[in-house]
Image (cartoon, rainbow, N blue to C red):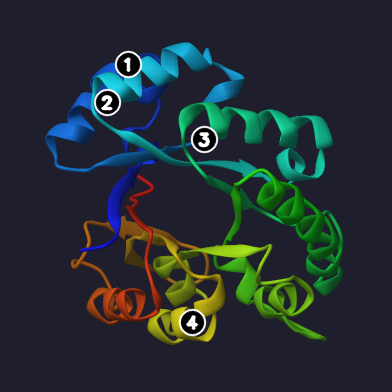
Amino acid sequence: MDHKIGVQLIVFGDRYNTDLDGVLADVAAAGYVGAETGLLNKTMETSFLQDTFAGNGLELTGIHGGFADMADQSALEQNIEFLKEMGSSYLICSGVAQEEGIKAFEAAAQVFNQTGQICRDNGITFCYHNHAFEFEAFDGGKGIHRLCELTDPALVKLNIDVYWVAMGEEDPAEFIRRYADRAGYYHFKDGGKHGKDQWWWIELGQGTVDIPAAWQAAQDVGCDWLVTEQDR
């Protein structure tokens, strides 16, 4: 395989904030080669994080923050510098601007193009992480597709979460192929929902997401990091 497999540390709950070395030891023992985190550079020293990841033979796949962490120039610069120091290259954003309806995505697109340019200038790849809310239909279309219409695929990539694509009632494999020029970093997660907004998560292959089809699509269009994730 020419891609790497990591895990999002959300599955460990708060433990990774208090026992990061133990968590990463478990990650390495399970056979992963990397781990994705939130913005640990806000709460832990870079030298400690470098030593802890290296000591467990793991890479930092990327870091994951919110819209404000991308829109604020100082925060963005700090996150970019941290990724460089960690030898990592993916900065991931969840969430859009605080506007109503489709305007939230249109306003975010302006910020993301600027963020993506700054990241690329520094050797970092900027990705937007989808949830299900981006697939809600507004006048002007679905938010995720409007966001992609207004952003440069060379600057704004996607952290494609196959579970949330499915919960947004689109086909993950088709979505991956549609945005092949933005793909490369994935969250593979499984589960389902009970009614509206009642999500549940389970191990890969045990839920309602067509994991094999999404896997094949990722192989077909290209995959750098495939990160497994289970929210609880």
The answer to whether mark 3 and mark 2 are in CB contact below 8 A is no
For the C terminus, give its image quadrant: top left
Residue type marked 1: Asp
Which of disc 2 and disc 4 is earlier in sequence? 2
At a point 76% along the width and 41% down the height, the residue shown is 68
Q: Mark 4 points at which residue?
A: 175
The answer to whether mark 3 and mark 1 are in CB contact below 8 A is no
Q: In which quarter of the image is residue 136?
A: bottom right
* Left or right position of 164 against 158: left
* Left or right position of 219 against 170: left
Q: Could you tell me which secondary element the residue under label 1 belongs to? A: loop
* Left or right position of 67 against 231: right
Q: Which mark identifies residue 19?
A: 1
The answer to whether mark 1 and mark 2 are in CB contact below 8 A is yes
- Provide residue 3's location: percent of width, then percent of height: 29, 59
At a point 19% along the width and 66% down the height, the residue shown is 206
- Provide residue 168's location: percent of width, then percent of height: 52, 76
User: Could you tell me how far apart the alpha carbons at marks 1 and 2 are, in whole angstroms?
Assistant: 6 Å
Q: Which mark identifies residue 38?
A: 3
**Residue 170 visible to an observer of this rendering:** no
- Provide residue 19's location: percent of width, then percent of height: 32, 16
The answer to whether mark 1 and mark 4 are in CB contact below 8 A is no
Q: Mark 2 points at which residue?
A: 23
User: Could you tell me how far apart the alpha carbons at marks 1 and 4 are, in whole angstroms?
Assistant: 37 Å
At a point 27% along the width and 52% down the height, the residue shown is 5
